[in-house]
């Protein structure tokens, strides 16, 4: 097919199962009906965090958190003992959890 | 700070309360200053504590709050005062209380999360018939607004912008600029719950202290500080879970018994996060020191709050 803008020939590419026509002249892209939605869906899948590596501590299923909460990784594992979080916990406990 | 010499007079007052007949202290124990701030100066002598409240305390509101603390219905929940009323000293009302052992600041594992939750649930379940007439609203939103005013007065600071943005997206009632909407639960609240507000009295049971902010309001405010600490990554999820589970088991009305508590907690937890961040910046400016990692984590949460306004994500509209 020809580019509707500059009339140069368009080439078809396949991006993760979505057919995209790109103009060989102006580099413009033509999407068929539904293809923009398909791309958006794919983008959403890319943006999702990678699954935790095997053996990583599981998040607490019973503790829902607000959207603005600290990233789950920020808790540094559960129990609060040892490591980065243990230090953080000791420091925040005595000061932050007692003052108004 | 007590620039007006209140401290020695308050110390004499608490000694006089312990030894009313003698002209001087006969027990030989010293005085200890438990707090010395414009909104609360607290001196202990032997088993008695005298508290000088803020100079701008409304006396009728304080009297209603003292009546609650002294009411037998709150035995085992609130520490009762030694005397029902307040005396005036250097323009500040002074009240007298039995001394209680506080929570150990150096031992996070010993924090009485279940007991705190149980006390709050019992407080929140108080029947209206028990409450004195003229009980004012709880002062949670007012305290948050005051912290933001303190931040603005502290002068420019690079971390102030995210805190003010987080504050700006809160509903008016949480900023103390409008009455609480009727759709929210209304109950008797402590108004300023943190781990410094629990003491173990002579009998050994934990009790709530500090009635300065007590009143009617959204009981979720009392859960919101632990909720905010959890959301900011300062409180481990299992400790937050212990607190929340104990509150629900005790029948606390602030959150639904078996569904997501965050629609109820979101706005108060945001307000307390902004309050905490505002005070942290104001204090760091006053002390001319940088913010530490814990304070930074609270300010980071404010940044995320501004990017996720209430009522959009998750439908936390009220």
Image (cartoon, coloured by chain):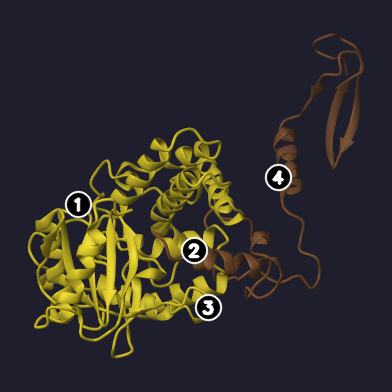
Q: Which residue is drawn at 31% across and 69% down?
A: B253
Residue identified by numbered label 4: A44
Q: Is residue A18 left or right of residue B218?
A: right
Secondary structure, mark 2, is helix
Camera-nearest residue between B5 and B261: B5
Secondary structure, mark 1, is loop
**Labels 4, 3: one chain:** no
| Label 2 to label 1: alpha-carbon separation | 26 Å
Residue B61 coordinates in the image, percent (x, y): 13, 58
Disc nearest the viewer among 2 and 4: 2
Camera-nearest residue between B40 and B61: B40
Chain of the residue under the numbered disc 1 shown in the image? B
Disc 3 packing (10 Å; few <14; some 14–19; many ≥20): few
What is the number of the mark on residue B126? none
| Label 1 to label 3: alpha-carbon separation | 34 Å
User: Is residue B215 at least partly visible in the picture?
Assistant: no
Residue identified by numbered label 3: B107
Q: Which residue is drawn at 12% across and 82% down?
A: B22
Chain of the residue under the numbered disc 3 shown in the image? B
What is the number of the mark on residue A95? 2
**Labels 2, 4: one chain:** yes
Residue identified by numbered label 1: B55
Residue B30, compared with residue B157, is above or below; it is: below
């Amino acid at each position: 097919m020809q580019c509707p803008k500059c009339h140069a020939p368009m080439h078809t590419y396949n991006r993760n199962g979505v057919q995209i026509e790109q103009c060989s002249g102006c580099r413009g892209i033509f999407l068929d009906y539904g293809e923009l939605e398909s791309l958006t869906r794919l983008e959403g899948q890319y943006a999702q965090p990678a699954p935790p590596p095997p053996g990583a501590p599981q998040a607490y299923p019973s503790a829902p958190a607000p959207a603005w909460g600290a990233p789950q990784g920020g808790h540094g594992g559960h129990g609060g003992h040892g490591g980065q979080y243990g230090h953080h916990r000791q420091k925040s406990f005595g000061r932050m959890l007692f003052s108004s | 700070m007590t620039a007006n010499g209140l401290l020695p007079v308050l110390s004499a007052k608490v000694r006089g309360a312990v030894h009313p007949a003698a002209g001087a202290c006969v027990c030989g124990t010293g005085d200890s200053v438990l707090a010395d701030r414009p909104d609360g100066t607290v001196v202990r002598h032997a088993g008695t504590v005298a508290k000088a409240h803020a100079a701008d305390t409304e006396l009728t509101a304080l009297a209603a709050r003292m009546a609650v603390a002294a009411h037998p219905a709150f035995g085992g929940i609130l520490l009762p005062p030694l005397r029902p009323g307040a005396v005036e000293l250097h323009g500040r009302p002074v009240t007298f209380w039995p001394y209680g052992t506080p929570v150990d600041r150096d031992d996070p594992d010993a924090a009485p999360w279940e007991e705190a939750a149980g006390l709050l649930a019992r407080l929140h379940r108080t029947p209206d018939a028990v409450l004195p007439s003229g009980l004012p609203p709880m002062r949670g939103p007012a305290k948050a607004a005051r912290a933001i005013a303190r931040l603005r007065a502290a002068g420019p600071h690079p971390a102030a912008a995210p805190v003010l943005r987080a504050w700006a997206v809160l509903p008016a009632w949480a900023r103390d600029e409008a009455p609480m909407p009727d759709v929210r639960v209304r109950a008797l609240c402590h108004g300023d719950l943190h781990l410094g507000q629990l003491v173990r009295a002579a009998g050994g049971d934990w009790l709530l202290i500090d009635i300065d902010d007590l009143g009617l309001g959204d009981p979720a405010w009392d859960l919101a500080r632990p909720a905010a600490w959890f959301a900011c990554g300062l409180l481990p999820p299992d400790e937050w879970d212990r607190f929340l589970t104990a509150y629900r088991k005790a029948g606390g009305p602030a959150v639904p018994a078996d569904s997501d508590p965050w629609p109820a907690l979101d706005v108060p937890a945001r307000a307390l996060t902004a309050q905490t961040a505002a005070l942290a910046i104001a204090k760091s400016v006053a002390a001319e020191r940088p913010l530490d990692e814990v304070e930074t984590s609270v300010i980071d949460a404010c940044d995320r709050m501004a990017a996720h306004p209430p009522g959009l994500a998750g439908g936390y509209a009220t």
